[in-house]
């Protein structure tokens, strides 16, 4: 059974190890510890059998939610862990009064982009060379900037028209 709970500083080492396995520029243990001390940062972990298998973060930046650090152990991918974490994180953000959420994702990370689209995020721009070098090529990679915007009447709005 998978459970989701708030991340604590005691989870920083496991979260950092997970990031290192998944990203060439993953966060350090110290980065997680420092972020968890911020009053506008909310991070969550997914656990299975007492082991950290996924993470997802939220920062409340002037009333907008920035989703960060969505990461799941390889063997738990395609099993709904990232969906459960993202759904939980978005709901927690809504409880804080956040109506609009944003995130960045590698342009080549099609599974993640598909997940975010499932939750109503849409691409609104690109940050050139945003991510550190890729393990395979040694080149920097662009980030797709995605937003999930909620209008005052509760409908989802976007900057770009739907295709």
Image (tube, rainbow, N blue to C red):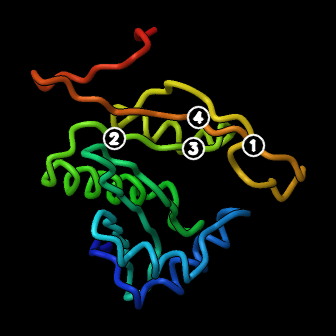
Residue carrying label 3: 105
Q: Earlier in the sequence, mark 1 or mark 2?
A: 2
Image mark for residue 101: 2
Say above or below: 27 vs 155. Answer: below
Residue drawn at x 43%, y 85% is 11
Which of the two marks, 2 or 3, is nearer to us in this view?
2
- Toward the right, the furthest residue is 137
Label 2 neighbour load within 10 Å: few <14, some 14-19, many 20+:
many
In the shown orientation, is residue 136 left or right of residue 148? right
Q: Where is residue 133 shown, x and y percent of the image?
A: 81, 54
Q: Where is residue 116 shown, x and y percent of the image?
A: 43, 39
Disc 1 + disc 4, Cβ < 8 Å: no
Badge count: 4
Disc 4 + disc 3, Cβ < 8 Å: yes
Image mark for residue 141: 1
Distance from disc 4 to disc 2, alpha carbons, whole Å, reads 14 Å
Where on the picture, by quarter, is residue 57? bottom left
In the shown orientation, is residue 34 left or right of residue 98? right
Label 1 neighbour load within 10 Å: few <14, some 14-19, many 20+:
some
Residue carrying label 4: 144
Say above or below: 81 vs 119. Answer: below
């Amino acid at each position: 059974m998978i459970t989701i709970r708030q991340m604590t500083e005691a989870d920083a080492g496991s979260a950092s190890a997970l990031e290192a396995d998944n990203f060439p520029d993953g966060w350090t243990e110290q980065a997680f510890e420092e972020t968890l001390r911020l009053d506008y940062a909310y991070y969550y972990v997914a656990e299975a059998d007492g082991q950290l298998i996924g993470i997802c973060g939220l920062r409340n930046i002037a009333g907008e939610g920035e989703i960060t650090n969505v990461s799941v152990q390889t063997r738990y991918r395609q099993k709904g862990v990232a969906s459960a974490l993202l759904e939980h994180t978005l709901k927690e953000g809504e409880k804080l009064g956040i109506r609009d959420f944003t995130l960045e994702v590698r342009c080549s990370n099609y599974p993640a982009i598909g997940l975010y689209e499932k939750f109503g995020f849409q691409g609104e721009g690109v940050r050139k060379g945003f991510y550190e070098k890729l393990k395979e090529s040694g080149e920097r990679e662009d980030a797709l900037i995605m937003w999930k915007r909620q209008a005052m009447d509760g409908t989802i709005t976007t900057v770009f028209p739907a295709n």
